Image (cartoon, grey):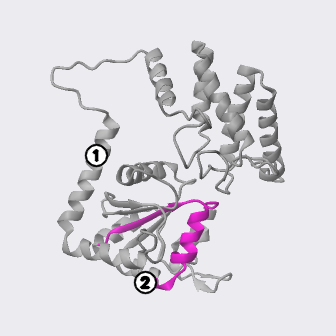
Amino acid sequence: MSNHNIKHDHKQREANRLIKEKSPYLLQHANNPVNWYPWSEEAFLKAEREDKPVFLSIGYSTCHWCHVMEKESFEDEEVAGLLNKDFVAIKVDREERPDLDQVYMNVCQAITGQGGWPLTIFMTPAKKPFFAATYLPKHTRMGISGLVEFLPKVAEIWQLDRQKVEQSAEEIVSALRRQAEGPDLHEGQKEKSLHPEEILDQGFRGLQNTFDEQYGGFGGAPKFPSPHQLIFLLRYFKRSGSKEALQMAITTLQKMYAGGIFDQLGYGMHRYSVDRHWLVPHFEKMLYDQATTIEAALEAYQASGDPQMASFSRKIMSYVLDELQSVEGGF
C-alpha cells in the first residue's frame, strides 16, 4: 500500500505522503487533498518524468498565515485539483530544514524585495526557481494573485513558453551566485582583505545608518527585535568604547520593553511589530526569539547597570519557564 492511501481516522480522508513524516508541521498537512511530497529525490524525479514544474511551500507549525493558506487553499478541493494536475507539490518545515528555508528565502528576497512565511516557490525539476512569493490567497484580492487564477497561468507558460521560464530561472540563479560571491573586481584591481577591526567598524556604520533614533530598532515597519544586532552593538561598545553603540542598543531594548511587542500581561516577546513604534505585535511567540532577547537584555544590563534591563530579562525567563517548558524539562 502506498503512503498516500493510508487512512487517517481524524478527518476520514486519504492521507498523502506526509503521513509518514515526523515533523508536526508536515503532519498537519497529511490529510490535505493536495498530493504533497516531502522534500525528496522521489518528488523531483516525478517532476522530471512528468515534465511538471515544482510547487514548493515552506512554513512552520506556529505560523499564522501558513494556517490561513492551508484553510483557504490547501484544504480546498479546487486548488488541490489544480496543483495535483499540473504541478508536483512539496511541503517543507523550515524548522526541520533551515538550510532549504535559507536558500529559498534568499530567492524570494532577491525577486520580491521581501520575505516571510508561508514561502511559496515555483521551480523547475532541476530545482531552479523562476517565481517566488509568500502568502497567496485562493482568489485574487487587494492586488495579490490568487492560486485559482495564478496556477493555470503558470502551467500554461510552462507548456507554451518554456524558454522564457528557463531563461528566468537561469537569471535568478546567476544573480544569487553573484551575490554569494561578492562584487566583481575590476581588471588589474587587487583584492584587498579588510582587517577584523575594519569589518566591525563597517558593521557598526551599517546599523548606524538604519537606526531609528526616535523609536529604536532599524528601518521602518514591520520592525523585528533583531537581538543579534543589539548583541553586536553591545560587544562593539565593550571593544571600542563607543557610547553611541551602547545607546542604540539600550534605546531599542527600552522601547521594546515599553511597547506591545513585549506582552505586558503574560510576558514574552512577540515575533515582530507591524508598526514602527513597537506598539501592535504580530501575535506569535517563538522560543528562539525569547532566548536571544534574554541574551541581549542581560548583556545590556552588564554593560549599563540599567535595572530595567534586568527586569526585562527576568520577565521573559518567567514566560519561558511558565509557558514553553514541557513537563519533562525541555522547551
Residues rendered magenta in the picture? 52-78
Label 2: state its secondary structure. helix
Task: List the residue tagged with mark 1.
Answer: 175
The image quarter containing residue 123 is bottom left
Task: List the residue tagged with mark 2.
Answer: 81
Residue 276, percent from left and from top: 59, 45
Q: How crowded is mark 2: few (under 14 residues within 10 Å), some or many (20 or more)?
A: some
Q: Which of 300/156 is in front? A: 300
Q: Nearer the viewer, mark 2 or mark 1?
A: 1
Q: Residue at x 84, y 50 (%)?
A: 322
Residue 145, percent from left and from top: 40, 71
Q: Residues within 10 Å of mark 1 (few under 14, many from 20)?
A: some
Give the vertical position of 11 relative to 317 (above or below).
below
Mark 1 belongs to which amino acid? Ala
Give the vertical position of 280 relative to 205 (above or below).
below
Label 1: state its secondary structure. helix
